[in-house]
């Protein structure tokens, strides 16, 4: 069965601290996609990144970086020098690849990690 | 480029009523998926439409249904509303069924 686990329910940091959000996934497929989304209080899920299972290169985008390790089935997200605007709930998600063209279109989400960045 | 638009943003309905939610995807996107978000269950997949065909369905009762029109706009319908249907309903659109961009959601309250 497919599953995404975000063990950290809530994290609280002080501005400018670095913070890592953990994500562990389970899937039997060899081809899949992993995502991170940010959900501010307004409710919209903001897309942050998508990785496919064949691309294990770590990625950096500004203060954000992602560490994908297939050996441990993890896709962790680090925010460097956190800011108050980073306060939100962050979701990790998994999507499996279907033979009939592209992904399944069915995202399996973790329970989310609520990040609070205090000034 | 306009994002995913969901209407209405807020709804209050009474138990037993039915409700229709609308989602307009990003222009050119043919895949639309629906998700229910509740504090207890988190984000759960409802169904996905691709070129007017339901491609995939989550584990929800038959009271939950949907459809997609030729212009890719999608609607979801919930009949015989129950208190437990109170949730944030999110719609996601995708060009190639790899990325998924979400709207702001419709917050449904059943009283």
Image: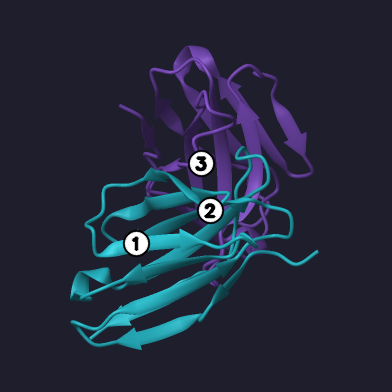
Q: Which chain is purple?
A: A
Residue A76 picture quarter: top right
Q: Residue at x 36, y 46 (%)?
A: B57
Residue B72 picture quarter: bottom right
SS class, disc 1: strand
Return the x and y of residue A95 as percentages of the image width and height: 49, 34
As displayed, is residue B3 above or below residue A114? below
Front in this rendered view, residue A76 or B31: B31
SS class, disc 2: loop
Tell whether B45 sits left or right of A79.
Answer: left
Return the x and y of residue B20 as percentages of the image width and height: 40, 76
Mark sitting earlier along the chain (2/1): 2
Chain letter, disc 1 residue: B
Of labels 1 and 3, the one closer to you: 1
Residue placed under numbered mark 2 in the picture? B52
Q: Are marks 1 and 3 in contact (CB under 8 Å)?
A: no
Q: Are marks 3 and 2 on the same chain?
A: no
Q: Are marks 1 and 3 on the same chain?
A: no
Residue placed under numbered mark 3 in the picture? A105
Of labels 3 and 2, the one closer to you: 2
If the image is split into quadrants, where does the C terminus of chain A sit?
bottom right
Front in this rendered view, residue B66 or B60: B66
Q: Residue at x 54, y 78 (%)?
A: B7
If the image is split into quadrants, where does the N terminus of chain A sit?
top left
Chain letter, disc 2 residue: B
Of labels 2 and 1, the one closer to you: 2
Residue placed under numbered mark 1 in the picture? B65
SS class, disc 3: loop
Q: Residue at x 30, y 62 (%)?
A: B64
Q: Colour of chain B?
A: cyan
Q: CA distance from mark 1 to mark 3?
A: 17 Å
Q: CA distance from mark 3 to mark 2?
A: 14 Å
């Amino acid at each position: 069965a497919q599953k995404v686990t975000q063990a950290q329910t809530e994290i609280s940091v002080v501005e400018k601290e670095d913070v890592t959000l953990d994500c562990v996934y389970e899937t039997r497929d060899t081809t899949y996609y992993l995502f991170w989304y940010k959900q501010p209080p307004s409710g919209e899920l903001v897309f942050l990144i998508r990785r496919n299972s064949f691309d294990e290169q770590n990625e950096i985008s500004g203060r954000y970086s992602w560490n994908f390790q297939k050996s441990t089935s993890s896709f962790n997200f680090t925010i460097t020098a956190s800011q108050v605007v980073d306060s939100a709930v962050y979701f990790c998600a998994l999507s499996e690849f279907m033979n009939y063209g592209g992904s399944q279109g069915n995202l399996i989400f973790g329970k989310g990690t609520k990040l609070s960045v205090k000034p | 480029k306009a994002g995913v638009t969901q209407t209405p943003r807020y709804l209050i309905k009474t138990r037993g009523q039915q409700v229709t939610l609308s989602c307009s995807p990003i222009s050119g996107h043919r895949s639309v998926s629906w998700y229910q978000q509740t504090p207890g269950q988190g984000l759960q997949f409802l169904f996905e439409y691709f070129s007017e065909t339901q491609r995939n369905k989550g584990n929800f009762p038959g009271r939950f249904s949907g459809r997609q029109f030729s212009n890719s706009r999608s609607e979801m319908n919930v009949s015989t509303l129950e208190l437990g249907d109170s949730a944030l309903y999110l719609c996601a659109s995708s060009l190639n069924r790899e990325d998924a961009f979400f709207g702001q959601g419709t917050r449904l309250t059943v009283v």
